[in-house]
Amino acid sequence: MSEIVIDVEGLTKRYGEKTVVDGLSMQVRRGEIYGFLGPNGSGKTTSIRMMCGLLTPDGGTGHTLGYDVVSETAAIKREVGYMTQRFGLYEDLSIRENLDFVARIYGMSQRRERVSEALQRLGLTARQQQLAGTLSGGWKQRLALAACMLHQPRLLLLDEPTAGVDPQARREFWDEIHHLASGGITVLVSTHYMDEAERCHRLGYIAYGRLLATGTPDELVAASGMSTWVLAGDGAGNLGHELESQPGVALVTRFGNAIHVSGHDPVLLKNAVQPYLQRPEIRASVGLPALEDVFIHLMRQSADNFAPAAGAPHA
């Protein structure tokens, strides 16, 4: 079995004159949790849908699970579990009825046993007769994942699966994702949460339809070439406006009573924070940029693919 589960080159999708995904090239390995990050409207969902055969690309080539993303979409769909941003099951059916319905669609043999196994695995057995519409966000998430796993897919595509879910439910969800990956299932997951990004094996950051960076969390921080000073203490959070205009400061990120001051020239950066180092109420230390710092800086450097062209009239 190939170690490369997703292998796409130059995937492009346009709607009218707007290019939503612009030349996406990436690979995802078997058993890997690959985090797909980027702001709203960056092209994450469109990219995922092209990879699983739900959208036809306007350009580029690729294979998912060895199948061509243009000509073999039906085969891809049979072996992929796709969990959308919004809950897509029937709210007026019970948990078990929803899973049984999905099993019927796939024409599964031993349907009752397969549904019972899914209920047990996701901790849904005690609630199996509860209507899906009465579930909290966390329980709906478990049901959606159980439905994705019923046909035993080799690849899971999860589109912002934990949006609006409480921290405990998010933690339990990610524990299950890691358990699945350890069994050889590949997971491509889009997320906005930095703590979730750090739990992925590798990451790709997409903004304005372009993949700007890919690698492990540590590799992305190292490759950013950014240096960071952490200023903390009373009043530190109010220093951002002063520092943002200083030479050598590329980014200031606020964290309550602390700020991260980042830039690419360590000497200029130290000169910028030097006046604040003597203040007794300020604690200063050299640190590493956070993933969030790296991604915000990448996004600011990227051109908006929906911005009007130079000289073009605004709508």
Image (cartoon, rainbow, N blue to C red):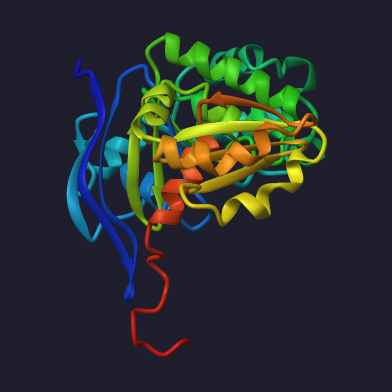
Q: How many marks?
A: 0
Q: Nearer the viewer, residue 173 or 43?
A: 43
- Residue 310 figure quarter: bottom left
61 horizontally vs 14: left or right: left
Q: Position of residue 2 (x, y in %)?
A: 19, 19
111 shown above or below 70? above
Q: Position of residue 196 (x, y in %)?
A: 57, 28
Q: Residue, x 73% and y 16% (percent of image)?
A: 125
206 horizontally vs 174: left or right: left
Q: Position of residue 221 (x, y in %)?
A: 42, 29
Farthest residue to the bottom: give it.
313
199 shown above or below 67? above
Image quadrant containing the N terminus: top left
Q: Nearer the viewer, residue 230 or 164?
A: 230
- Residue 114 figure quarter: top right
Q: Nearer the viewer, residue 250 or 9?
A: 250
131 horizontally vs 90: left or right: right
Q: Residue, x 40% and y 79% (percent of image)?
A: 308
Q: Residue, x 41% and y 90% (percent of image)?
A: 313
Asked if one can make out residue 94 in the rendered structure from this viewpoint, the answer is: no
